[in-house]
Image (spheres, rainbow, N blue to C red):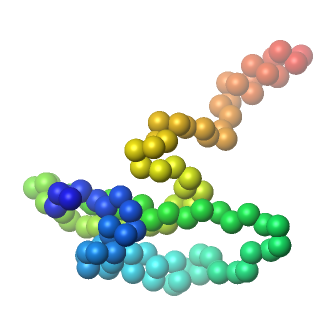
């Protein structure tokens, strides 16, 4: 792994103390802000996948300034497997206008 590249997986990130610190900072922030609480999954319920995402922020000299790690919900994509497949549940306003125009 290059010095400026971010890890791809948790297993890779946990080997580095600097990335562990970045993850600990994120967890402390989540706990401090009371963002979520861990609960039992209801019978028949489906869990939402979580994945650690990592990014290195560089300064003006191209050296690593900060390392950030955060959880991203609903991550089902796998690195180098299905990253090109994109589906977003978003409707553009011009699409709604077209549908209303056609309906009238």
Rendered position, 62 above or below 51: above
In the foreground, 35 or 69: 69
Q: Is residue 54 left or right of residue 30?
A: left
Residue 53 placement: quadrant: bottom left
Residue 64 lies left or right of residue 42; in this view the side is left
Residue displayed at 32% across by 67% down: 12
Q: Is residue 26 above or below residue 12?
A: below
Quarter of image, res 43:
bottom right
Front residue of 68/17: it is 17
Asked whether, in this view, residue 64 is left or right of residue 12, the answer is left
| x and y, in percent, of residue 5 in the image | 24, 56
Would you say residue 59 is visible in this rendering? no
For the point 51% across and 84% down, the residue is 32
Residue 57 sits in which quadrant? bottom left
Along the viewing direction, whichever of 49 and 25 lies nearer the viewer: 49
Identify whether 103 is placed above or below 13: above
Q: Where residue 50 appears, x then y in whole percent? A: 55, 64
């Amino acid at each position: 792994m290059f010095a400026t590249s971010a890890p791809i997986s948790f297993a890779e990130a946990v080997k580095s103390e600097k990335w562990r610190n970045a993850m600990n900072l994120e967890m402390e922030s989540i706990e401090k802000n009371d963002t979520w609480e861990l609960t039992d999954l209801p019978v028949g319920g489906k869990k939402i996948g979580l994945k650690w995402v990592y990014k290195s922020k560089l300064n003006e000299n191209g050296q690593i300034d900060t390392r950030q790690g955060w959880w991203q919900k609903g991550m089902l994509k796998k690195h180098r497997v299905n990253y090109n497949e994109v589906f977003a549940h978003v409707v553009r306003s011009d699409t709604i206008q077209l549908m209303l125009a056609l309906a009238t």
